[in-house]
């Protein structure tokens, strides 16, 4: 049975935690951190969201962001960021 979808209305502030499978490292070197920050900037502009804080750890990321009514929803933003970095 699939998990029920979360309610994430646009125009709200969210604390998002995303981490590697089995808590494995997702950032192996300084270049990987820079790549993630570039992707974060790209999707911030694309979906017109505000990023208040971020913390990049070796195996996970914390984001505090606000989606906008005119921009993309939380699911769209995070899907874009995570898929781009995974590729």
Image (cartoon, grey):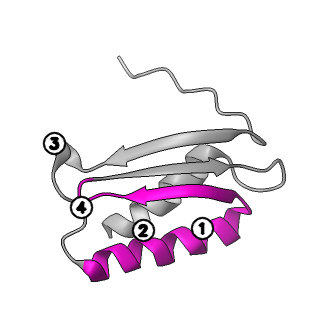
Please identify the quadrant where the N terminus is shown.
top left
Specify the label residue 28 is tagged with.
Answer: none
Name which of mark 2 and mark 1 comes first in the sequence. Answer: 1
The residue furthest top is: 1
Q: Mark 3 sits on what residue? A: 22
Query: For numbered disc 2, what is the local secondary structure?
Result: helix
Mark 1 closeness class: few <14, some 14–19, many ≥20 residues within 10 Å: some
Specify the label residue 84 is tagged with.
Answer: 2
| Mark 3 vs mark 2, CA separation in Å | 20 Å
Residue 39 x %, y %: 49, 73
Name which of mark 4 and mark 1 comes first in the sequence. Answer: 4
- Indicate whether 63 appears above or below 4: below
Residue shown at the point (24%, 54%) measured from the top left: 59
Mark 2 closeness class: few <14, some 14–19, many ≥20 residues within 10 Å: some
On whether residue 20 falls in the magenta region, the answer is no
Name which of mark 3 and mark 1 comes first in the sequence. Answer: 3
Look at the numbered discs 2 and 1 and tell me whether their residues touch, using CB distance below 8 Å. Answer: yes
Residue shown at the point (70%, 58%) measured from the top left: 50
């Amino acid at each position: 049975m699939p998990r029920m979808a979360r309610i994430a209305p646009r125009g709200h502030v969210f604390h998002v935690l995303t981490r590697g499978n089995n808590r494995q490292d997702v950032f192996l070197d300084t270049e990987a951190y820079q790549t993630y920050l570039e992707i974060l900037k790209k999707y911030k502009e694309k979906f017109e969201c505000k990023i208040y804080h971020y913390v990049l750890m070796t195996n996970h990321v914390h984001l505090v962001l606000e989606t906008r009514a005119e921009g993309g929803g939380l699911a769209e933003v995070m899907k874009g960021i995570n898929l781009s970095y995974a590729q």
